Each structure stands twice: as structure tokens, then as C-alpha cells.
Amino acid sequence: MLCLMVGLFINVGVSYALQLINVDKFIEFISTRYTVQSIARAEQYKTFLSEYAQRSEPEKIAAVNHFFHQHITYSTDLELYNQSDYWASPAELLGAGQGDCEDWAIAKYLSLRQLNIDDSKLRLVYVRARIGAIGSPLSQAHMVLAYYPSPGSEPLILDSLISAVLPASERNDLTPVFSFNAEGLWAGQSDMRSTQSPRARLSRWRDLLERLPNEGIVL
């Protein structure tokens, strides 16, 4: 099982495009739609991004993961948006102060892109998360963020379920289904990138990317 996990998470491909957030426009978007507490949270996010811009990659990974565990609580899409599955933007997540696993993973991904971590080192990973003890047949759909320190290396997993950043081999409760980033899509157990773009295959990802420019984010 551990070997399978590492194999499914193997990183391929190279990308040099960087995610850029216009933080002032980002905060302006939040200020027109959310509470004073939300604006304060957004200002903390702006300060955080500035403070960690020149730190090492391991420091950025740990800090981004900690920031969202410190400032965001878990809530379902039904509770927040009256929808069974809605992918919120980072502005919506920080504005509400709540979100589900996709919202957490996407916000961490975009934050790390803003901190100049290359897209080739990051993947949003859709998994089946085991419910209960080892051997339990129960699982649920879940999303995490994987960070690859170097090409082909074992990734670290950033998760909304637990605050620790752990190697994939220590997360045998997760079974990858597919993964993607801004540049590629990987399906099933293959380490070969799909010829189709994530925008074409993933309607919720496409919808999210279309909303982001209004919030100061251009991918």
C-alpha cells in the first residue's frame, strides 16, 4: 500500500508560470462582500505573504499550511453555499473563514504559487480518504495538496483533515484518484500526463479560474 501511494504521487513535467495575486484588489473584493473580521483576516494574509516571500521552500510549505489551519475552520458546501460541491476561491474562503477540503487545498496551492513555488512542484490531488481504522471499507471523496521538493521525489501532503505536513508514504489512509495543477492533469495510477487540459476536463476548476481575475488573481 505504501509503495502504491508513493508511486501514484510521483511528479512529472516542468512548468515555469507563476501565480500572481494583486493583494490590494484581493482585499478590496473581500471588503465589499464580507465582515470587518473578514477584512482583518485578509490583511493578516497580506502581511503573511510579504513576510514569507523570501523564505526557503520548506518554511513556505509549513507556514502556508499553518496559516490556514490557524485562520480557517472546516465547513461543508451545503452549509456555506447550499450546493453539494462548490470550489471556493481564496477570497471566498478567507471572507467566510470557513471551507471544505477543496477550498483549503486550492487556497494553499495559490498561496504557494504567489510565494514563487513553481507549478511543477505542486498538484491538487483528488483522493479517496479512508474512514475508520486500517482495513475499513469505508471512504469518502477528499482533496489534498501535494508538494514535490524535486522531480520524482516523494511528495509532502498538505491536508485540511490534519495539521501536520506528512510524506505521502505516511498517509496510507489516502488513495489517489487523479491530480492536476494549472498546466496538467494526471489520472488514475498513471504518471503520464493527460493530453487534455485541466480546464477542459474539470468544469469546477474552469469555473473557479474564470472567477479569479475579479478577485485580483491571474493564473
Image: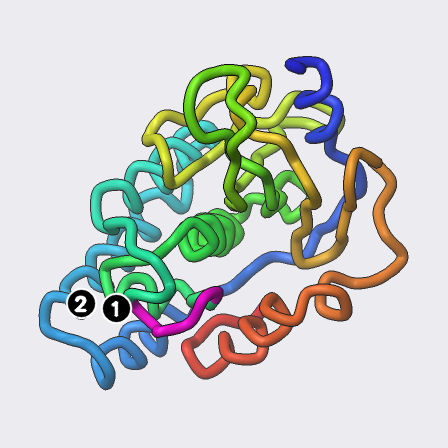
> Which label was assigned to residue 149?
none
* Nearer to the camera, 69 or 20: 69
Residues in magenta, as a range: 80-85
> Which label was assigned to residue 38?
2
> Residue 81: image x %, image y %?
34, 73
Describe the element under mark 2 as helix, strand or loop.
helix
> Residue 95: image x %, image y %?
25, 68
Q: Residue at x 84, y 46 (%)?
A: 193
Residue type at mark 1 is Gly
Q: Say above or below: 41 vs 194.
A: below
* Nearer to the camera, 92 or 215: 92
Scheme by which the image is coloured: rainbow
State left or right for residue 198 relative to residue 19.
right
Number of residues whose C-alpha sits closer than 10 Å to that of mark 1, classed few (under 14), some (14–19) or many (20 or more): many
Q: Residue at x 38, y 41 (%)?
A: 160
Residue type at mark 2 is Ser
**Quadrant location of the N terminus?**
top right
Q: Say above or below: 199 vs 32.
A: above
> Residue 15: image x %, image y %?
74, 50
Q: Which residue is mark 1?
A: 95
> Residue 142: image x %, image y %?
51, 44
